[in-house]
C-alpha cells in the first residue's frame, strides 16, 4: 500500500516522523507525569516539557501559556467550550451555524435538551454565515456563539474577525472550532475577539488523541472532566505528555511555504477536474477556502461508488453521500449550503497534506474522470 | 486490499451485468429512495405465452451494494416466470452476493422493488393486474415490509419496529418504536412515507416515534 494517494487529510493525517521522534523520549525515558514534579526530578522534567509544549501553542496564537489547556482532541475541546461556558455563565441561549462539525452540533443539541435555546444560523450558497441573521439571533440571554473558522467538508473560511466583533459588541462569548484551519490560516487572539478556540493535533500531522482549547483569560467555564487539578483545574485527568509534545512539534513544522504548496495543489486539482469532467461543480467558496480542501459534486453519480472505485485505484478520498454516513443522512453541510440530496449524493472531498505531491494530481484527475464516466454509463439519470 | 464488501459484491460492482435500457420494454420501473438518494431503473421483456422473463436490464444511480444487487437480481430473474421472479427477496439477493452489510439493506432493496414494480407494470399493461385494492392496515403493513431497519438489515415489520398503524380519512399514522432523535429516525421516516404516500387513496402519512428523546 505504499503508492496510495491519500487525499483524506481532513479525516486524519500521517504523523510526521519528526513528531514521532520528539514524542519517543516521553514514552521511554521521561515517562513521569507533571503532577509528580514535587516528588522527583523526572516529574520536573515532565512538567517542563509540558510547559514548553503549551508555550509553543500559546505562541502560535499570540496567547499566554495559561490560556491553553490540553484535551483529548477537538471533540472534547468543543464539548468543554460549549457545555462548560453555557453552564458557568448566565443566560439560556446559544447560537451556532447550521454547518458546524458534529462536536459543536451535538453539544448544542445536548444543551437544548437540558433547557437551553439554540439558534442555528443559516449559511449562503458558498457556506458563509449570514451576518444579519447572526446579529439578529443574539438575544439578551445569549451566553455564547459558536461559529467555526473553516468548514470540515467544503473548506469555507468564515470572517471570524467580524463575527468576533459582533459578539464582543453584544457582550456574548465567542467560540470558534479551528480544527481544520489552525496553522493553515492566520489566527491571532490579539487581533480577533475570540474567547474560546478548539484546536486539534491529528489534522496537522501530529498524533491522534491530543487537542487543545484556548480559553481567554477571565472566561468562566465549568470543568467537565473531574479528576485532579491538572490543566489549571479546568480539565482533570493525567496529562498526555507525549501527545502534547507531538502536537507542539507538529505546530512548529508547519510553514507558510507548505501552506502555499497545498494551495497550489488544491487550485490545480480544482481547475483540472472542472475542466476535464463534465457536470462537476465546486462546493464551497472558490476564494475564501482552506488551502488544503477541494470538494466537488459529480452530478448523476453516487459518492460511495466513486470512493470505492478510487480506492481500488489506490486513491483515498471521502464523500458527503448519505450511503456513506453512519446515519444514512446526506451531509448537513451540503444541504446547509442549499444543495439538494443529489448534490450531496455525488460530492467528493479531496484534502491535501504534507505528503502529497504535484505529480499525484494528474493521476487523481485522470482516475476521477474515468470513474465518473464509468458510473454515468450505468446511471439512469441523463445529462442535458 | 481490505474492502467493506464481499468479493462477489465487489466483482459485480466493478463489472455489473445486464446494464442498460430497452427500446420497447414490456414492463418498466424506476425506484428511488429519498432517504439515501439511490435510484434504480429496470426494464423487462416477457414472453406472453410462457410468462418467462426473456430479457432484463437495469441502471443504477447508487452505491456499491445498490449496483451489485441490481446486477445479481437481473441474473436471478432472467429465465424465470414472472410469478417465480416476484418471489425473489432481498435476502435471496444478499445471500447470492455472499452477504451485504446490514446498514446497506435499504440501498439494495430498491433493486428487488424495481423488479416487482416492473412485473406489476407488465401485468397492468397487459390486463393481468388485479383490481385496485383499497388501502387497509394490512396493506400498509405489507408495504412496510419493504422498509429496511438499518440496525438489523431486516424489514421494520419483521423486527417489530412498527408498534401501531392507524388509518383515518386517508391519513395513515405509523408509530415507530424508536426515539425521535435516533440515528436512523430520519431515514426510516422518509422511507415509510415513500412507501405509503403514493397509494391512490392515501393523502397523508404521519410517522410518530414512541420513545422519549435520549
Image (tube, rainbow, N blue to C red):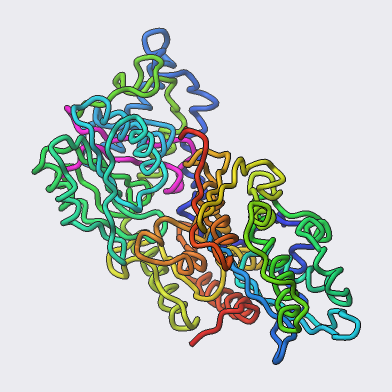
Above or below, A365 against A318 in this view is below
The picture places residue A143, in percent across and down from the top left corner, at 20, 35
Q: How many marks do you count on the picture?
A: 0
| Residue at image point 84% right, 79% down | B53
Viewed as shown, does residue B150 lie left or right of A198? Answer: right
| Residue at image point 19% right, 37% down | A142
The magenta-colored residue range is: A193-218
Above or below, A67 against A352 in this view is above
* Quadrant housing residue A232: top left
Judged from this view, the residue extending furthest toward the right is B50
* Quadrant housing residue A45: top left
Above or below, B74 against A177 in this view is below
The picture places residue A342, in percent across and down from the top left corner, at 48, 69
The picture places residue A353, in percent across and down from the top left corner, at 45, 57
Residue A127: within the magenta? Answer: no
Q: Nearer the viewer, residue B42 or A143?
A: B42
* Viewer can see residue A115: yes
Above or below, A305 against A152 in this view is below
Rendered-image quadrant of the N terminus of chain A: bottom right
| Residue at image point 39% right, 22% down | A225
| Residue at image point 52% right, 46% down | B185
Amino acid at each position: 500500500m505504499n503508492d496510495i494517494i491519500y487525499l483524506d487529510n481532513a479525516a486524519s493525517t500521517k504523523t510526521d516522523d519528526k513528531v514521532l521522534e520528539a514524542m519517543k523520549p516521553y514514552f521511554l525515558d521521561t515517562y513521569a507525569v507533571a503532577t509528580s514534579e514535587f516528588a522527583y526530578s523526572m516529574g520536573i522534567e515532565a512538567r517542563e516539557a509540558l510547559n514548553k509544549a503549551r508555550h509553543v501553542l500559546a505562541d502560535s496564537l499570540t496567547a499566554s501559556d495559561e490560556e491553553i489547556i490540553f484535551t483529548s482532541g477537538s471533540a472534547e475541546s468543543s464539548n468543554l467550550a460549549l457545555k462548560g461556558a453555557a453552564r458557568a455563565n448566565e443566560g439560556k441561549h446559544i447560537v451556532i451555524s447550521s454547518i458546524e462539525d458534529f462536536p459543536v452540533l451535538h453539544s448544542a443539541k445536548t444543551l437544548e435538551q437540558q433547557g437551553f435555546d439554540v439558534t442555528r444560523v443559516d449559511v449562503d450558497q458558498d457556506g458563509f454565515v449570514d451576518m444579519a441573521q447572526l446579529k439578529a439571533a443574539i438575544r439578551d440571554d445569549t451566553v455564547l456563539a459558536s461559529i467555526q473558522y473553516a468548514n470540515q467538508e467544503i473548506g469555507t473560511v468564515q470572517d471570524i474577525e467580524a463575527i468576533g466583533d459582533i459578539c464582543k459588541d453584544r457582550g456574548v462569548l465567542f467560540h470558534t472550532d479551528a480544527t481544520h484551519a489552525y496553522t493553515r490560516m492566520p489566527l491571532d487572539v490579539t487581533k480577533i475577539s475570540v474567547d474560546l478556540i478548539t484546536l486539534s493535533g491529528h489534522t496537522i500531522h501530529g498524533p491522534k488523541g491530543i487537542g487543545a482549547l484556548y480559553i481567554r483569560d477571565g472566561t468562566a467555564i465549568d470543568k467537565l472532566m473531574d479528576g485532579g487539578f491538572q490543566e489549571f483545574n479546568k480539565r482533570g485527568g493525567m496529562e498526555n505528555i507525549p501527545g502534547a509534545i507531538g502536537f507542539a512539534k507538529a505546530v512548529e513544522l508547519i510553514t507558510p511555504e507548505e501552506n502555499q504548496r497545498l494551495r497550489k495543489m488544491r487550485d490545480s486539482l480544482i481547475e483540472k477536474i472542472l475542466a476535464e469532467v463534465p457536470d462537476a461543480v465546486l462546493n464551497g467558496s472558490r476564494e475564501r477556502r482552506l488551502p488544503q480542501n477541494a470538494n466537488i459534486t459529480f452530478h448523476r453519480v453516487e459518492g460511495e461508488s466513486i470512493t470505492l472505485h478510487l480506492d481500488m485505484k489506490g486513491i483515498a478520498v471521502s464523500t458527503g453521500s448519505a450511503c456513506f454516513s453512519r446515519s444514512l443522512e446526506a451531509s448537513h453541510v451540503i444541504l446547509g449550503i442549499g444543495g439538494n440530496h443529489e448534490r450531496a449524493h455525488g460530492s467528493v472531498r479531496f484534502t491535501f497534506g504534507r505528503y502529497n505531491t504535484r505529480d499525484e494530481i494528474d493521476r487523481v484527475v485522470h482516475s476521477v474522470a474515468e470513474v465518473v464516466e464509468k458510473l454515468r454509463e450505468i446511471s439512469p439519470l441523463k445529462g442535458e | 486490499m481490505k474492502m467493506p464488501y464481499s468479493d462477489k459484491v465487489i466483482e459485480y460492482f466493478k463489472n455489473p451485468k445486464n446494464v442498460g435500457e430497452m427500446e420497447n420494454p414490456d414492463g418498466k420501473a424506476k425506484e428511488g429512495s429519498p432517504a439515501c438518494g439511490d435510484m434504480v431503473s429496470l426494464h423487462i421483456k416477457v414472453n406472453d405465452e410462457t410468462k418467462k422473463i426473456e430479457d432484463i436490464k437495469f441502471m443504477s444511480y447508487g452505491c456499491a451494494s445498490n449496483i451489485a444487487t441490481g446486477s445479481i437480481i437481473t441474473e436471478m430473474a432472467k429465465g424465470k416466470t414472472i410469478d417465480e421472479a416476484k418471489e425473489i427477496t432481498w435476502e435471496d439477493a444478499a445471500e447470492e452476493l455472499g452477504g451485504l452489510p446490514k446498514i446497506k439493506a435499504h440501498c439494495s432493496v430498491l433493486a428487488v422493488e424495481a423488479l416487482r414494480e416492473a412485473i406489476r407494470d407488465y401485468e397492468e399493461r397487459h390486463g393481468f393486474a388485479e383490481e385496485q385494492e383499497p388501502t387497509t392496515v394490512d396493506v400498509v403493513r405489507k408495504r412496510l415490509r419493504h422498509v429496511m431497519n438499518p440496525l438489523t438489515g431486516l424489514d421494520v415489520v419483521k423486527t417489530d419496529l412498527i408498534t401501531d398503524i392507524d388509518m383515518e380519512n386517508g391519513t395513515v399514522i405509523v408509530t415507530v418504536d424508536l426515539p425521535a432523535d435516533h440515528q436512523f429516525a430520519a431515514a426510516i421516516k422518509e422511507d415509510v412515507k415513500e412507501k405509503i404516500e403514493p397509494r391512490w387513496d392515501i393523502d397523508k402519512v404521519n410517522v410518530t416515534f414512541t420513545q422519549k428523546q435520549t
